[in-house]
């Protein structure tokens, strides 16, 4: 195959990805009204093979977004309602004695799905929360001494209520770090909320799949192939190094957080129909990737990502 043919084939593939992503966006926009940026953030997280944490007050569409994503992407879906009495076995599964076979038979839990919604994750005890750690980090679970693979794609979308509400447990840092991105939805714009109240939406109807798991896997491989040039890597390093300066944050960003930031920026570039990362892609995903990983040593209204960008840009200038 000639270089010209290869380039033409790559262009057709990129056009197909861009068209597919736009159709997914349009489908989700019929369910999550007036939130195009949050839809893109959620899509970027899935494309980067990461896990998503949605933190907001009840009733703004967190569960709707998760369910819509699974439907539009053609993924198997399970939902776990986290409560204070939920046990790890309720998530992972348990062996039950089969009298006919005179042996124990493993019954898989809801973790065995391509997209798992952990609804109100911070209402469960830390013991139950920790049942997700191996699954989110390794894509597998170890039950009764046996390791079981969860397959790919595999995404956990967790929702949590504000930590100042009653009956909640703070997620430990190790759990937060497993989430590639954390986003909020907020209330819908006035016009969209009026549509919702008037019943002029399609929210009651299930979404028809736009793609399937095999196509999603292709898109995820395309994200991994997005080029990150040395200049952008140097910019990422400046952000990481500044976060580790003494006295700025309680603790700096880890190498794993740096890899998460790069993957998210690659996914954002793909959503922008580019095969290379710009500093603007890093800046676009920075709040969702780092704000749940950093705590500023001094108070104030500025978010950790705002402090990072302000200081790094000042040093560069």
Image: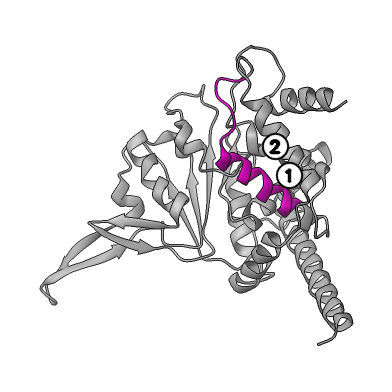
Query: Which of the image's four quarters has the C terminus?
Result: top right
- Magenta segment boundaries in residue numbering: 249-268
Task: Judge left or right: residue 45 versus residue 277.
Answer: left
Which residue is found at the position 79% from the left and 74% from the top?
13
SS at mark 2 in the image: helix
From the viewer's perspective, is residue 166 above or below residue 197? above
Q: Give percent across and percent down for residue 258.
A: 63, 41
Spatial CA span between label 1 and label 2: 6 Å
From the viewer's perspective, is residue 296 above or below residue 230? above
Query: Which is the main secondary structure of the residues drawn in magenta?
Result: helix
How many marks the image carries: the answer is: 2
Q: Give percent across and percent down for residue 287.
A: 70, 34
Which residue is found at the position 46% from the left and 50% from the top?
137
Task: Judge left or right: residue 6 versus residue 63.
Answer: right
From the viewer's perspective, is residue 244 above or below residue 3? above
Circle 1 is placed at which residue position? 233
Instruction: Tell which of 21 and 246 is nearer to you.
Output: 246
Instruction: Tell which of 228 and 101 is nearer to you.
Output: 228
Instruction: Tell which of 202 and 225 is nearer to you.
Output: 225
């Amino acid at each position: 195959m000639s270089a010209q043919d290869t380039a033409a084939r790559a262009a057709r593939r990129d056009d197909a990805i861009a068209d597919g992503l736009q159709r997914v966006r349009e489908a989700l926009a019929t369910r999550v009204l007036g939130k195009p940026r949050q839809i893109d953030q959620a899509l970027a997280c899935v494309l980067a093979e990461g896990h998503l944490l949605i933190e907001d007050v009840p009733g703004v569409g967190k569960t709707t977004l998760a369910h819509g994503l699974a439907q539009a992407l053609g993924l198997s879906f399970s939902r776990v309602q986290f409560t204070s009495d939920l046990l790890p076995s309720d998530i992972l599964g348990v062996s039950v004695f089969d009298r006919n076979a005179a042996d124990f038979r493993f019954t898989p839990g809801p973790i065995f799905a391509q997209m798992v919604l952990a609804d109100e994750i911070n209402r469960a005890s830390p013991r139950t929360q920790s049942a997700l750690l191996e699954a989110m980090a390794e894509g597998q679970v170890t039950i009764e001494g046996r390791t079981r693979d969860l397959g790919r794609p595999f995404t956990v979308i967790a929702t949590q209520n504000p930590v100042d509400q009653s009956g909640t447990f703070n997620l430990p840092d190790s759990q937060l770090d497993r989430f590639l991105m954390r986003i909020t939805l907020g209330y819908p714009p006035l016009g969209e909320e009026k549509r919702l109240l008037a019943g002029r939406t399609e929210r009651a109807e299930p979404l028809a799949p736009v793609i399937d798991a095999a196509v999603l896997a292709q898109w995820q491989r395309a994200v991994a192939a997005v080029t990150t040039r040395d200049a952008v890597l140097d910019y990422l390093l400046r952000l990481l190094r500044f976060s580790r300066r003494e006295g700025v944050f309680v603790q700096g960003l880890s190498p794993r957080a740096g890899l998460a930031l790069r993957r998210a920026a690659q996914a954002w570039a793909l959503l922008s129909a580019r095969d290379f990362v710009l500093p603007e892609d890093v800046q676009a995903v920075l709040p969702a990737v780092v704000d749940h990983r950093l705590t500023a040593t001094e108070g104030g209204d500025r978010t950790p990502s705002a402090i990072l960008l302000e200081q790094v840009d000042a040093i560069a200038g």
